[in-house]
Amino acid sequence: MSTYKGHRNAKRRASGRNTAVGREKGKSRRKAAAFPGNTYIKWGTMILAVLTLVLAVRGFAVHGSKYVSVDASEPDIDVQLLDINPYSRPGIESSGITGIVIHYTANPGSTAQENRDYFNGLQYSQETSASSNFVVGLEGEIIQCVPTWEVAYASNDRNYDTVSIEVCHPDESGKFTDKTYRSLVQLTAWLCVKFDLTADDVIRHYDVTGKNCPKYFVEHEDAWADFKENVSLAITSEN
């Protein structure tokens, strides 16, 4: 009798152990199903790598990445020529365009319209002589202030043989918004094609006078090199 009871108790213990093991296995399976961490991490890593590669190859970048996808076609330009006056539009014909000069407004948050109106108002305030052929705004808008065949007061001794582009920026860093940057690349490339120039003929105000203008492109030579490369690519795409 004792042998039978012992055998029966042993079976019960074994059955209990099997039941416990079964429960643990069930929990493990449910946990694995609920948190398939390694599998998700691997797939997530693969997807991220593919997306990164696609963005890098296609080059649909914005300012802050290396390349932008624009061409050298004529951009939308709002022509608002300044009044002819001694302080911002003298009406003097240029001697032939041999370069494009990039500037920044040094007035964070100001718009293209505000800068254009400031130039035009100098005929009344007479506080200084200043202007630019074009102004590129915070939203990428482009205003033409002075014809490309006329002198603008922007680049010192290069006023007579260059076209000047004044560029708006949102903050003290001088870095341009994505929309501003794209418009600047397209406008610069279009002007290069128009005057039979290359990206090597695009310079900064800094390269003429040593002034910290345009600030971001002076303080970040890599960004300036990228900008010129973008202009070159845009010119090539047009030819």
Image (tube, rainbow, N blue to C red):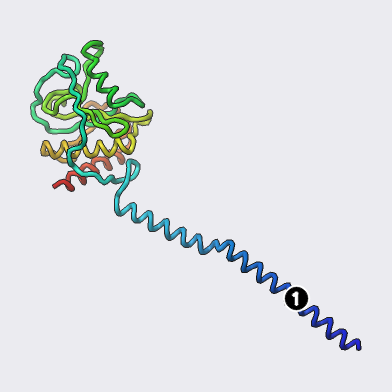
- Give the quarter of the image for residue 136: top left
Q: Amino acid at mark 1?
A: Arg
Q: Is residue 125 visible?
A: yes
Q: In the rendering, at what x and y percent does residue 116 appear?
A: 25, 22
Residue 204 in the image, given as x and y percentages of width and height: 24, 32
Residue at point 58% right, 65% down?
A: 33
Q: Determine whether, in the image, residue 142 is placed left or right of residue 219.
A: left
Q: Secondary structure at mark 1?
A: helix
Instruction: Determine whether 26 is above or below 103 in the image.
Output: below
Horizontal relation, residue 161 to residue 12: left or right: left
The image position of residue 9, as x and y in percent, is 84, 81
According to the picture, the residue beneath numbered tag 1 turns out to be 17
Q: In the figure, 13 relative to 64: above or below? A: below
Looking at the rendered image, the quarter that the N terminus falls into is: bottom right
Q: Nearer the viewer, residue 158 or 102?
A: 102
Question: What residue appears at the point 21 percent right and 35 percent down from the top-left corner?
Answer: 76
